Image (tube, rainbow, N blue to C red):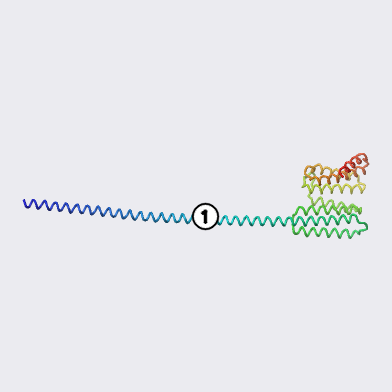
Amino acid sequence: VDDLAKSEVEAAERARVRNLRIRAAAYLVLAIISVGAAYFGLTSRNEALHARNEALAARNEAVLATERADEARLKAEAATKSAENSLRAVQQANTLAIEASETFLIDMAERLRKSFGVRPEDVETMLGEGTQFLDRLEAQMPGNETLRQARAKLLLEFSEVYFGRSEFERVGEFVDMTRTLLGAEEDSKLASEDAAILIRAEAIDSHRYRKMDRSEDAVAHAGRADALLQLHSGDLPEDLLLQARADVLRAVSTALAEAGRIDEAIDTGRECLSIG
């Protein structure tokens, strides 16, 4: 009986020890899992914090870049506006310089036309000085349309100076130079200012041929002036239109009279007078 009891006690002790070992192993496994989970959680948290910090840094960089871009855009806009204002001021100054030059040179030509006894060499000298003055302006503003038109007007003013001196071949040279300067081609549309200048050139040429007793050529060039007027009448401002029409009617009237077509000349002359 004692041996049986002893065996049962030993078996129970062994079972207890085994259970303790099982529990210890289970606790160890649980501890390892807990530590691993904690480490994984800590690592994930650190990675998440790092990613968040990187995202915040990137956002701050983006905000800063946007601010820099806005600042650069504002500076660029200010620089563009300043450049445009400067260019506008230069253009206005150029326009005023051309207008003042044109007024002076045309007034000089008109004075020559109305003066008697001016020597031919003096006329050539003043023409040369006027041309050189325009050359200097053109060197400062190449390709300026207003300056090109001012040169064409000066040519016509001096053609009338030579007309008054009965130097009709010289008149023809100036008219031809004006045509070339304007790039005039048959039936081609021109800018309104160019058209008005060319109409006047054709009218002057008509008067020149009339003075040279070439009535057919005079009528032909008066007709060319009239054709140009009809082609551009819808584009010309009122002041240029009236001036161009007066130039044409005077040319047509005198050419018709020279050709012996008196009635037509009288009718055209009356129409010219009605313009004023």
Q: Is residue 77 above or below residue 223?
A: below
Q: Residue at x 75, y 59 (%)?
A: 140
Residue 150 locus on image (x, y percent): 80, 54
Q: Residue furthest left?
A: 1
- Residue at 82% x, 55% y is 103
Q: Is residue 42 left or right of residue 87?
A: left
Q: Residue at x 83, y 45 (%)?
A: 242
* Image quarter in which the C terminus is found: top right
Q: Is residue 66 above or below residue 238?
A: below
Q: Residue 202: x, y in percent?
A: 85, 47
In the structure shown, which secondary structural element does the residue marked by tag 1 occupy? helix
Number of callouts: 1
Category of crowding for the residue at label 1, using alpha-carbon neighbours closer than 10 angstroms: few (below 14), some (14–19), many (at least 20): few
Camera-nearest residue between 1 and 229: 1
> Is residue 96 rendered to the left or right of residue 83?
right
Q: Is residue 111 above or below residue 272?
A: below
- Horizontal side of 27 relative to 154 (left or right) equals left
Q: Nearer the viewer, residue 235 or 79?
A: 79
The location of residue 270, given as percent across then percent down, is: 90, 41
Give the labeled residue for mark 1.
Answer: 63
In percent of width and height, residue 65 lies at 53, 56
Q: Which amino acid, mark 1?
A: Val
